[in-house]
Amino acid sequence: MKYIDEYRDAEVVRRIAERLAQATTRPWTIMEICGGQTHSILRYGLDQLLPEGISLVHGPGCPVCVTSVKTIDRAIAIASKPGTLLAAFGDMLRVPGSSGDLAAARSRGGDVRFVFSPLEALQLARENPHKEVVFLAVGFETTAPGNAMAVRQAAREGLMNFSVLVSHFLVPPAMEAILASSGNRIQGFLGAGHVCTVTGTEPYLPIARKFQTPVVVAGFEPVDLLSAILRLVQMLEEELVGVENAYGRVVEPQGNPAAAAVVREVFEVADVAWRGIGVIPASGLVLRESFREWDALRKFELGGVDTADDVRCRSGDVLAGRITPDSCDAFGRECRPEHPLGAPMVSGEGACAAYYRYRCSSAKPFSC
């Protein structure tokens, strides 16, 4: 197939669903790790095409959603300082901190801009030499190369009024933490296709072998997703362990070595906190010592920032796959897109946002 419409062909989807029904003899619980996949599954109703007994669980694959409250509070504190300009992706502006968000900071006079790439933030630093420009660098392995290149370019230019507030996460350690958790019920993973374009498939092999859990790398269109689910169920039924690539038109087994190299040059692995989940060892990236002059945490005094999660929000349980969004008592009531309690209701990859948009009328019509 050559064109995107072919990956949304209803007849092809129906045939794959029939094959899936034939292949399934036992119940299986599968996690799609990526929030973009969650949105596609709900948008096209793919979960409703699955055989009885196949359960899809939504994972923590939304970097906006797992960015800690402390990071948001730090970003708000930076944006509130005179002479600073904080640049961020658009869906970060309404992610709740412990008392407000970046949109509110902008309404109070903070210079907060939304950008589409870190290079735009770099350009803002060139155009505003009298301001300290801080880019809120959020993402998984997918956006890490672009953010690393921006920092490296700032260093090459000697652009000292540019820095980054880093909130970068790594997917494989999160998968391992889920599998090692008490009460884990995940039997197979759909791998995040866009992450694997950078990392390749190799980082998932040790996890698959250690936990005897198959992983199939998946894309984002209906045919991509159902094909990957079919292959994963076949592996589970046949008791096969390993990593397979069902997104071969995009993902190479070795990933993108050039992108991985620039990430290693600028960042190093560290223990980081995932919002609602807690600290996962070796699950994030921070700037290397050689780039400390472009680290906003070192440039600004942020020691007095206090943080607290909203106790009404169960985003941690949603992100860990323990509950679906509509199982949270606040969903559709206190927590709505116009007044979110947690990041999963705001982000374009958030599971709560997906449920509200595609399932709200049927899930909780009285509250939505």
Image: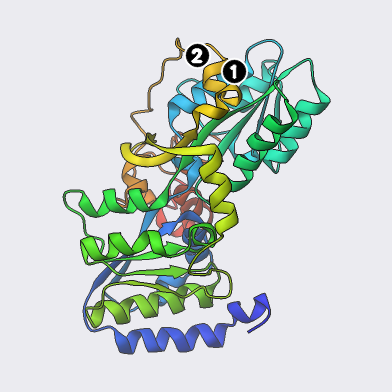
Q: Amino acid at mark 2?
A: Leu
- Residue 117 placement, left or right of 202: right
Residue 76 vs 14, above or below: the answer is above
Tag shown at residue 302: 2
The residue lying at 32 percent from left, 52 percent from top is 321
Q: CA distance from mark 2 to mark 1?
A: 8 Å
- Quarter location, residue 329: top left
Residues at circles 2 and 1 in contact by the CB criterion of under 8 Å: yes
Question: Residue 237's spot in the image, x, y percent?
Answer: 24, 81
Residue 38, image x, y percentages: 46, 59
Q: How many marks?
A: 2
Viewed as shown, does residue 264 lie left or right of 7? left
| Residue drawn at (54%, 45%) of the image | 263
Q: Nearer the viewer, residue 61 or 12?
A: 61
Kindly tell me whether residue 143 is visible in this rendering: no
Q: Residue at x 53, y 52 (%)?
A: 260
Q: Is 242 drawn above or below residue 6 in the view shown?
A: above
Q: Quadrant of the N terminus?
A: bottom right
Q: Nearer the viewer, residue 197 or 155?
A: 155
Please rate how many residues cluster around mark 1, counting C-alpha atoms within 10 Å: few if below 14, some from 14 to 19, many from 20. Answer: many
Task: State the image coordinates of residue 220 (x, y, percent, origin top left).
Answer: 54, 67
In the image, what residue occupies the spot 23% across and 74% down? Answer: 27
Q: Of the residues shown, which amino acid type is indicated by label 1?
A: Ile
Q: Earlier in the sequence, mark 2 or mark 1?
A: 1
Above or below, 130 relative to 31: above
Q: Which mark is residue 78?
A: 1
Tag 2, which secondary structure? loop
